[in-house]
Every structure is written in structure tokens, then in C-alpha cells.
Amino acid sequence: MIEQWVGTINGYLWGSVLIYLLSGCGIWFTLRLKGLQFTHFFHMFTLLKLSRSSSKEGISSFQALCTSLAARVGTGNLMGVAVAITLGGAGAVFWMWLIALVGMATAFAESTLGQLYKEKDEHGNFRGGPAYYMRKGLNSKALAITFSLCLFFGYGFVFSSVQANSITDAFYGSYGLDKLTTGIVITICAAFIIFGGLKKIARFAEFTVPFMGVAYLLVCLYVIAINITLIPNIIADIFASALGLKEAGGGLVGAAIVQGVKRGLYSNEAGMGSAPNVAAAASPNPPHPVAQGYIQMLAVFFDTIVICSCTAFLILLFKDTGSQAQGIQLTQQAMAFQVGGWGSDFITFAIMLFGFTSIVGNFAYAENNLKYLNLDNLYGHSFLKVGFLAMLVFGSVATLPEVIALADLSTGLMTVFNVISLILLTKAIAMVTKDYHQQKMQGKIPTYCPSENEHKSLNLTRGIWQKDK
């Protein structure tokens, strides 16, 4: 009965409610912030050049970007896109792009808020995220606790076990390696990183994510280059299928919209309330909350517009070969078709890297929310680490349909709470965004210096930003 009840709620949540809610949130902030993801598109890359500096209190903006990308870029970028195209056709890619473009505004809003309401822990390190701006900005401790509980369960225990399951499955299918042995190796490697704390996780992500992303991008660009004459027709097919311009594909428009929007939302995580947890830990350059908002918009762009698109083109170049493969096997066969047998091995190792970085990134999110569960102490951190690592071993050899269903429920609720909070805090987001752009237009280096009145009206934590004017 419980399984049926959870399944019914998830059907409504992920089948319609979250699609409308997250899409609406992206459109709202796109309009409210005057389309800054388009009008200030190149400013994101300008800030990326300045993002390597850090401080004793916080990690660098680049490390925060890489850590959020580590959690965003998972096996879904290789497998989920294949599923979306299988079920929704080429048109799904268009809707995946569209939802990412409006989702960039949502990512900007939530990461800016994460920075605005960040605090310092007992070690003097920056911490923040949705629970913090729910507690301070909305003055709702109950909402902060509920959100933290949902995130703690989903990201702290379940999602990483699913990633471990995908990795062990891939290695078992490709090389016949024992799943438990592979799972134990994954767990030992994860333990070495997570026991070093957030800064060690950030350093790992700073090295691994660029390497992983660039390697996959280069191989896919090579495939696109050798098939360059076919690309214009594929792009035309994407648009025609998405807009119902093809007679045979007209009936697929609904499926294309649903699958493309779902893939975009699941992949880039904009609005889910996950990325602000690590975004808040950064010391932005220039020292203004909006700077980190811009940097985190890049994460959505890289994840969906770049990496998911690479997978999409790879599959669409292969789909007319008559293969009946689905999911990750479709991606593997598509790569092998283009570059030879080693292509399948390359995808297997890409799954390992993408999945493992997601595992590490998920732990950072869960650890950040211990405060509002009264677990931000030695026992709480130990409980999370032991439970997290145990679930990696368990997940590597088990199928977890019931647990995954509960995680989907908790994440769905977490997203609902976060989106509602973002909408309610629109005024604060617009205020700091306007302050940033005004300083920029005046030729100044944007620096956030909240006045006494701003401290009181926004309920900001003292001692975080510059001294009062």
C-alpha cells in the first residue's frame, strides 16, 4: 500500500507538477531578471577567468562550479538523453535545450540567494543553501528542517547508491567484473575523498570535472566533425520534430515535449535546491552574491547545452542503423559505430567518472544540511559518512526500486519547497542583482556592502559581507 501510495504521488509530482513548476519558475525569473542569461551571456565567461581565487573562509568560485557540475553531470547525461530520444524522438532535444536556457535564470536566482544568506560554521568556513535562506529570508525554521530532511535522505543515501549501481553494471556488462568487488573499490575511493571535507571534495572536483568533460567533449566533437555534412539535417530534424512540422512525427510532439523537458530538468537540477549548497561555500570574485549566481548559470549551460547535446548528436547519427538498443547500451553502440570497438570502453569509463564525481558531489550537499537536523557534530558527521559509504556497497549489488521511489518523493518535495521559496524571495534576488549591475555600469568592481536597513529588511547574517555603509 505504501509503495502504491508513493508511486502515485511520484507520478503526479514528476509527471506534471514539477514540469510546470520548474518551467514556470525559469520563465518567471527570465522575465523578472530581464533575460540576463541572454543579455549578459558572455559576462559569465568573463567571471570564469576570475574564479580561481579563494580565501581561508571559502573555496574558489571555480571549485564551487566544478563541485556542482560533479553532482549534475552523472550517468543521466549518457543514459538519460538516450532514453529521452528513444521515447520522444529527435524533438526531445529541442525541448531539452529550451528548458535549460530558462533554467539558467533559476540557477542564477537560487545560487545568488545561497551566497546572500550564507553563514560561517564553527571552523570559520562558509556554509549556506536553501535551508539557510528559508530560515533567514522567510523566517521559517520548519521549512528549513523539512527541506534538509528531504535532501539528507535523497542525496545522503540513495542517489549515490544508484550511481554506484550504474557503474558496477557497466563494468560487469563490459568486462564481467564482480559487482561487489567493483562496489568496494568505489567505496574506498569515495571514503578517501569525503573524509577530507568539503575543501578536499572541491579540489578533487576542480581536477576531475574539467578532465572528464573535456575528454568526452573532444571525442564527441571528433564524431561530429567526421559527420559534419549530416549535422544540418539532424538539426533540421530536431526542430521539425519538436514543432510538429513533420507529418509522420506530428503525433510525437507531446512525447518530445515531456521527455525533453524531463531530461533537461533532471540533468541540470536548476531549481531543485542542490547546487546552492556548494555555491554558498565559495568566496566569489568580485565579492558580490550575484557573481556566484552567474558562475552557477554556467553549470546549467555546460551540463545540458554542451554535454547532453554531445550525447544527443552521437545518438541521432546512429539511430537509423536499425539497432534496438536502449539506455546506456544505445550510447555505447553509437560511440562504437563511429570510432570502433574502443568507443564502448570509452563510454564505460566515462560512466565511471561521471558517476563517481556525482557520488562525491552528492555527499557535499548532504553534509551541508546537517545543521538544521541538529547533526552538525562529530556523531552526525560520522553517521552520515558510515551510512553513505554503506549504501554505496549495498547499491552496487542491489536493485533499489522502493528506495529510489522514496528518494524521488523526497527530492520532488524538496524541489517544490525550494521553488516556492525562490518565488517568495524574488524581491531580494532582484535587489542584489540591480545593485550588481548598477556598480558594473558605473565602472566599479561590484562589491556587496549591505546597509543597516538592508541587513534588517533581508535578515542577513552579520560579519559575512563588507561592513555597513
Image (tube, rainbow, N blue to C red):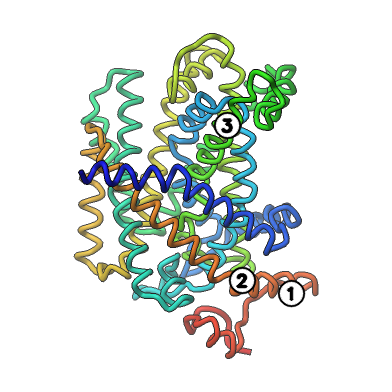
Q: Are marks 3 and 2 in contact (CB under 8 Å)?
A: no
Mark 1–mark 3 distance (CA, rounded to whole Å): 43 Å
Q: Which mark is residue 439?
A: 1
Q: Secondary structure at mark 1?
A: helix
For badge 2, the amino acid type reads His
The mark lying in front, picked from 1 and 3, is: 3
Q: Residues within 10 Å of mark 2 (few under 14, many from 20)?
A: many
In the figure, 145 relative to 191: above or below?
below
Residue at 31 percent across and 42 percent down: it is 7
- Residues 203 and 18: in front is 18
The residue closer to the viewer here, 256 or 371, is 256
The residue that disc 3 covers is: 256
The residue pinned by badge 2 equals: 288
Q: Is residue 432 visible?
A: yes
Classify residue 50 as left or right of residue 463: right
Earlier residue among tags 2 and 1: 2
How would you rate the neighbour count of disc 1 (Cα within 10 Å): few for under 14, some for 14-19, many for 20 or more?
A: some
Circle 3 Cα neighbour tier, 10 Å, few/some/many (<14 / 14–19 / ≥20): many
Q: CA distance from mark 2 to mark 1?
A: 11 Å
Camera sees residue 217: no
Amino acid, disc 1? Gln
320 in relation to 21, above or below: above
Name the residue type under label 3: Ala
Report x, y in % for residue 342: 48, 16
Quadrant for residue 109, please give it.
bottom right
